Amino acid sequence: MPTSRPGGEIRRQMLASMILVRAFENRLSKLVADKEDVLGMQILATGQEAASVASVQALTPEDVIVSNHRSHGHLLARNADIKTIMAEIMGKATGVNKGKSGTLHLIVPEVNALMTSTVVGAGPSMAAGAAFAQQYRDERAITAVFFGDGAAAEGNVHEAMNLAGVWKLPLLFICENNCWAGAQALKEHCAVGNIAVRASSYGMPGKLVDGNDADEVHSAVSELAEHCRSGKGPALLEAYTYRMRGHGEHDHQHYVDKEELELWAAKDPIRIYRARLVQEGLLTEEDVRGMERDASARVEEAVRFAAESPFPAPEAAVEDVWVQSPWAGR
Amino acid sequence: MLEMHTGVAVREALTLAMEQDERIFIAGEGVGVSIHDSPLMPTYGLLQKFGPRRVKDTPVSEAAIAGLAVGAANLGLLPVVEIMFFPFITLASDMLVNHAAKLRYLSGGKSSFPLTVRVKTGIGFQAGCQHCHPLEAWMAHIPGLKVVYASTPADAKGLLLSAIFDPDPVIVIEEMGLYWMKGDVPEGDVRVPLGKARLVKPGRDVTIVAYGSAVYTALQAAGQLEAEGISAEVIDLRSLVPLDKQAVLESVKKTGRFVTVHDANKFCGFGAELAAMVAEEAFDSLKAPVRRVAAPEAPVPFCPPQEKFYKPDAGKVNAAVKGIMK
């Protein structure tokens, strides 16, 4: 049980946001299954909604987030425009990145989701640079970087943590430990067994929380973000959660024990949170059904917008490489 | 004009840039307190002048150094980071190749990464091939990166100033041997534009294109050839990306012969790109085949006689030119 719970309005927002993220990803999954519109690899974070949404909600809008290939939750919790994100996933000209990124590297500077990398473990060192810029300019804002347990095996993550520790950067490392790195289980790729303990190696606080409990994640991120904001240096949060679907929609989890999936399905973060808020009288069942209807309507509108949008001109493939093209006029 | 060493000229550029723009910081291994306590080194004394906020010694972490530059540039700073030796850029290459070069594209043009990476190179230090490996063709091959390579103190200063204030990521290659070379350098913020080659010596019979210390190899050869009645034109590229195609092609159209010189390996080296460009765009002007003078297909050797054998010299350039003069 968390020491201090977020306020009622924040908790209602978190539930609404988690419902929206689930609806968005369920719809994507269906589009893939029906072989409609969406292109390329689709990578979802079903089951991780509490970790991603509560983390983002505990930050300020000025804080910079650096995401990875499972970014839908982070971005929608930041109120990024759902229509242009869906259009990007479909490779359309109206996409948030003009169809250049697809679902994998969604970059939404409008909501301070400044960088996304799908090179596993690359985010933290760029995030160190962002946090350095904030420290350099003496800003109140901090940077939060999201990475998985698999990424924690990358040397880059160590380098970033060490640099952040030495320079006391305002950088919050958030490991969404979803128990899987591709088809490799946590115990097969992680010698220690959890990620949070590594914090002590870099002179920062580390905390392990139940990543399926939105309240607990929110409280932990609030506390650690405050640590970073007050000039005491970086912090590491490990939100222990579970990847309910395969690495991508092409992966049907033949390597996963069915009982394990059922165990985690019983711990579904949205179902738990919904029940809790209703039980505490913060919402009625009807309120929640309203949230679901609203989420569904927004997702359908986004799909319609994206489907009706044109593809970008093929020739635009060579644009946006440089600010000043070295080849202009040559 | 002031006469100064190249190392000092690089420091002039860093100092001038940092004085005029608070967004600039420098970071790297030993950029503040260096094991080389020499006033000819580019970052000597900058820590004392600008303080530890703007001159940042990093841990031995090339990926983090480059990541620092990417993230800080995205948030509006103008990072100038140093990678100590060119082969170590392989450790930073994910950040440079997959991030600095691509994130603007992936963002659909919303982001920009005005960072500068200074990297040291050069053959002739008996350092062996893990400290010495000219990789400029790798960098030039990546869309999204610009690559500059000075051969004089004046250009080292002017190109670095342009690189620092360029809105895109620029790899600035510094040849260590040139740090100790003196030359006239214009005072103040005098920038050399990226993508403008320098005509080093005019000539009629053959165009020799080089960059870095290979320019002096080419010049030495041109002097010997002159004595034998062959007039060679020598061009110093100064920047590989953007490339001054016009300067090269116009020269070839005038002379009808083309030779490239560089210290990097011949196979897939930058000379291959130049040769292909001339074949594609100035074939009708060619009176003879193109020739490339470059290092053999081996890593840079350690011992002095092998190093000397390996590095292209004036004799090899001379022979290449004579081979196409008939």
Image: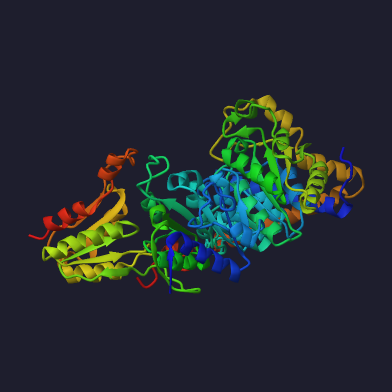
State left or right for residue A8 relative to residue B187: right
Using the image as rendered, state which of residue A2 and residue B49 is in the foreground. Answer: B49
Q: How many marks?
A: 0
- Seen in the picture, residue B190 relative to A306 is either above or below; the reply is below
Q: Quadrant of the N terminus of chain B?
A: bottom left
Q: Position of residue B154 (x, y in %)?
A: 41, 68
Q: Is residue A210 above or below residue A284?
A: above
Q: Using the rendered view, name the quadrant where residue A214 is placed.
A: top right
User: Residue at point 25% right, 59% down?
Assistant: B218
Colour scheme in use = rainbow
Q: Position of residue A303 (x, y in %)?
A: 61, 57
Which residue sits furthest left?
Answer: B326
- Could you tell whether B37 is left or right of B5 in the image? right
In depth, the one of A318 and A49 nearer the eye is: A318
Q: Residue furthest right?
A: A281
Q: Which one is nearer the viewer's eye here, A69 or A123?
A: A123
x and y, in percent, of residue A248 in the image: 57, 40
The residue sitting at 63% across, 59% down in the picture is: B48
